[in-house]
Image: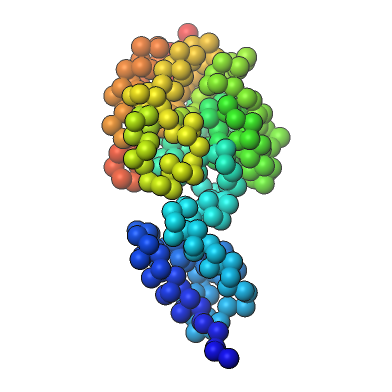
Amino acid sequence: MPEAPTIGELLAEARAELAAAGIDSAAADARILMMDSLGLTSTDLHLRSGQPPSRPVEPFRQRLLRRMVGEPVYRILGYRPFYAHEFTLSADTLEPRPDTETLVDLAIEALSGRFGRETPFLFADIGTGTGAIAVSLLSEFPFAECIAVDIAQGALDTAMENARHAGVSARIRPLVSNYLRSIAEPLDAIVSNPPYIPSDEIDGLDVGVRCHDPRRALDGGADGLDAYRALAAGAADVLRQGGDMLLEVGAGQGDDVRCLMQRAGLAFVSSRADLGGHERALLFRRAAG
């Protein structure tokens, strides 16, 4: 009977198979899938590399096959780390990505300056998806409350599950709405990572995005700006005077979004670039009365 392969041998084999399938992140993905599938830590991969795993390897091999045909690694796991928490994914939610942490960083900076950590305030997360933005901000501001808005009930169900796991569900209210239309109370801030990919560019996206993220969470209309128009149009009805609008934007969209928001009476305050150097998060403020 042949000896069982060691952890090191399995990892090397997985890296090679993913690389041969054209996966650019083969090494990282092999490690992530192996650790989750076989119950290993990164330390185990080094210290136990010469030992066979204690769990069956077939689930790991099945996950490798899924990754080889383009399914994103965190879709395979069913969750993704973001900021200080892990967020369950579903078919109704966009996979939260590191670029959006740039928006959360800017929001924390802006809201800390206005409210500190002990002042109650109300914000809305528009297009909440997994609830990654809402949960991350509620974790930073223990007296804040959030209206989590999404057009898909399934996304709101996922967001509330994630809020419960993070211990903030008592301060988050799910609302099925198309952008700001159904919000009936004044907000101190609006935060959103809306759809911003131009419609004719979606088919050219990586297979992991175009086939596994919901199209409605990607498609920003012909020029990628439809969601920003909707947010600009509704801001005056729900955003308090002196309130903040914080938005994630696609690369190169900053100037267009600034024009839309400024025409809606929102003054540009600041922006922040992502790790790739692209302007990614914008802060606007409604004038105080």
Residue depicted at 34% across the width and 40% down the height: 204
Residue 267 can be seen, yes or no: no
Picture coordinates of residue 2, whole percent (x, y): 54, 89
Looking at the image, residue 217 sits to the left or right of residue 122; the answer is left
Q: In which quarter of the image is the N terminus?
A: bottom right
Q: Which colour scheme is used?
A: rainbow
Residue depicted at 49% across the width and 19% down the height: 243
Q: In this view, does 180 lie above or below 252?
A: above
Residue depicted at 64% across the width and 31% down the height: 153
Looking at the picture, tell me which residue is in the foreground, 27 or 99.
27
Looking at the picture, tell me which residue is in the foreground, 142 or 248.
248
Furthest residue to the top? 289
Picture coordinates of residue 6, whole percent (x, y): 51, 82
Residue depicted at 49% across the width and 44% down the height: 212
| Quadrant of res 23 | bottom left
Picture coordinates of residue 12, whole percent (x, y): 42, 75
Looking at the image, residue 226 sits to the left or right of residue 37; the answer is left
Q: In this view, does 63 lie above or below 127?
A: below
